[in-house]
Image: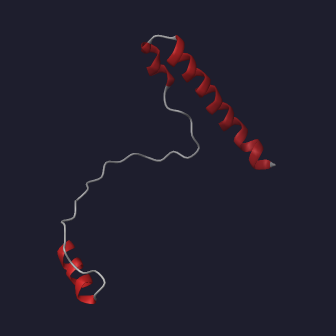
């Protein structure tokens, strides 16, 4: 019962945000979208930029021990 009471305020703020979002999207000019802000969340995941390195295409038989070694060597 305690976790329900603790999450009540978070649920209420998310519902209020959703109602404001519907009102702004459907009935107000687009200038008001900036006032809405992000949806409130208890699980906020920070955004960070990562660098991705694409792997090369390899024609190696991965079911053999030699093939696995060759894959590791190519990725280094």
Q: Quadrant of residue 55?
A: bottom left
Q: Position of residue 39 (x, y in %)?
A: 54, 33
- The answer to whether 68 appears left or right of 41 in the picture is left
Give coordinates of residue 33: x percent, y percent: 46, 20
Picture colour scheme: secondary structure
Q: Where 46 sits versus 54, above or below? A: above
Residue 33 seen in this snapshot: yes
Provide residue 28's location: percent of width, then percent of height: 50, 11
In the figure, residue 30 lies in which quadrant? top left
Judge by depth and name the residue closer to the eye, 55 or 47: 55
Percent coordinates x, y for residue 62 in the rendering = 28, 80
Q: Which residue lies most toward the bottom here?
A: 65
Quarter of the rendering occupied by the C terminus: bottom left
Residue at 26% across, 54% down: 51
Task: Give the side of residue 64 with respect to residue 11, left or right.
Answer: left
Q: Report the front residue among 69 and 62.
A: 62
How many marks overall? 0
Q: Which of 43 and 29 lies nearest the eye of the viewer?
A: 29
Is 9 positioned to the left or the right of 29 in the image?
A: right
* Residue displayed at 56% across by 35% down: 40
Q: Nearer the viewer, residue 75 or 46?
A: 75
Say which quarter of the image contains residue 4: top right
Is 75 above or below relative to 28? below
Residue 76 visible (yes or no): no
Q: Residue at x 39, y 45 (%)?
A: 47
């Amino acid at each position: 019962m305690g976790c329900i009471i603790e999450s009540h305020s978070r649920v209420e703020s998310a519902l209020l945000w959703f109602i404001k979002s519907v009102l702004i999207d459907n009935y107000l000019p687009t200038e008001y979208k900036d006032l809405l802000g992000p949806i409130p969340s208890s699980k906020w995941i920070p955004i960070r930029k990562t660098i991705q390195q694409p792997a090369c295409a390899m024609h190696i038989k991965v079911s053999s021990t030699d093939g696995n070694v060759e894959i590791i060597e190519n990725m280094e």
